[in-house]
Image: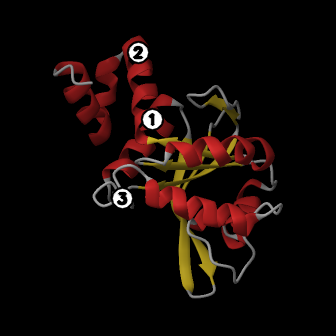
């Protein structure tokens, strides 16, 4: 049974597992000062080969956070504001220090240290999949976050576009019907032809 409970998280798991062949652990607990938080997904391929993001970035190990608030922030403006606050809190550090406010939990020191323990290295990516992110903010801060700190941002449109391109080249599409999300994808995109 899935531990996540929204469509973006389910779509992201499908993208990681089916599209990229990653082994995925989800809802990994992280002790924080007020109780427990979690890492939505920890992902890497079992053959230890890198997988490629839609922009061509190779990823070997990643922790992934999904955030979907399209019902009140359809254009990602609030996410953009929160991201700018977190970038200011990060400064030149790899993570936001314990006790400091973080809008995106996976940028916290506790989450960074947990991922470092899981992977036995700091050489991992942090990937945020959001419904939308203000385009001006995305252009302003995301390239430097990716290059300097391996912090990457994707929107649901990026993930769906990547899934469609992969699906169109897939030879055994009916093999996706063994999981609920794969079966939904096969029904809606394959059978109904929805894009």
Q: Are marks 2 and 1 in contact (CB under 8 Å)?
A: no
Tell me: residue 135, above or below residue 174: below
Could you tell me how many numbered marks the image carries? 3
Q: Which residue is mark 3?
A: 69
Q: Which residue is mark 2?
A: 170
Q: Residue at x 16, y 22 (%)?
A: 192
Q: Residues within 10 Å of mark 3 (few under 14, many from 20)?
A: some
Whether residue 179 is visible here, answered yes or no, is no
**Where on the picture, by quarter, is residue 185?**
top left
Residue 94: give x, y in percent of width and height.
79, 60
Q: Residues within 10 Å of mark 2 (few under 14, many from 20)?
A: few
| Residue 139 appears left or right of 113 | left
Give the camera-side residue of 29 and 131.
131
Whether residue 57 is visible here, answered yes or no, is yes
Name the quarter where the C terminus is drawn.
Answer: top left
Determine the secondary structure under disc 1: helix
Give the camera-side residue of 43 and 192.
192
**Sooner in the amino-acid sequence: mark 3 or mark 1:** 3
Residue 144: give x, y in percent of width and height.
74, 44
Q: Residue at x 55, y 44 (%)?
A: 136
Tell me: residue 142, above or below residue 66: above
The residue mark sitting in front, 3 or 2, is 3
What is the C-alpha distance between the residues marked 3 and 1? 16 Å
Q: Which residue is mark 1?
A: 159
Determine the secondary structure under disc 2: loop
The residue mark sitting in front, 3 or 1, is 3
| Residue 138 appears left or right of 1 | right
**Where on the picture, by quarter, is residue 177?**
top left
């Amino acid at each position: 049974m899935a531990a996540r409970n929204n469509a973006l998280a389910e779509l992201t798991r499908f993208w990681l597992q089916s599209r990229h062949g990653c082994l995925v652990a989800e809802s990994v607990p992280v002790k924080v000062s007020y109780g427990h938080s979690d890492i939505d997904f920890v992902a890497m391929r079992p053959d230890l080969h890198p997988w490629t993001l839609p922009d061509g970035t190779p990823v070997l190990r990643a922790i992934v956070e999904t955030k979907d608030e399209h019902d009140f922030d359809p254009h990602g403006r609030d996410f953009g504001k929160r991201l700018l606050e977190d970038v200011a809190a990060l400064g030149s550090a790899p993570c936001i220090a314990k006790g400091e406010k973080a809008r995106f939990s996976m940028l916290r020191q506790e989450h960074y240290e947990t991922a470092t323990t899981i992977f036995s290295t700091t050489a991992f990516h942090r990937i945020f999949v959001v419904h939308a992110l203000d385009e001006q903010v995305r252009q302003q801060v995301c390239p430097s976050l990716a290059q300097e700190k391996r912090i990457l941002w994707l929107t649901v449109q990026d993930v769906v576009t990547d899934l469609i391109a992969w699906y169109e080249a897939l030879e055994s599409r009916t093999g996706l019907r063994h999981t609920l999300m794969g079966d939904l994808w096969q029904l809606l995109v394959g059978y109904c032809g929805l894009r």
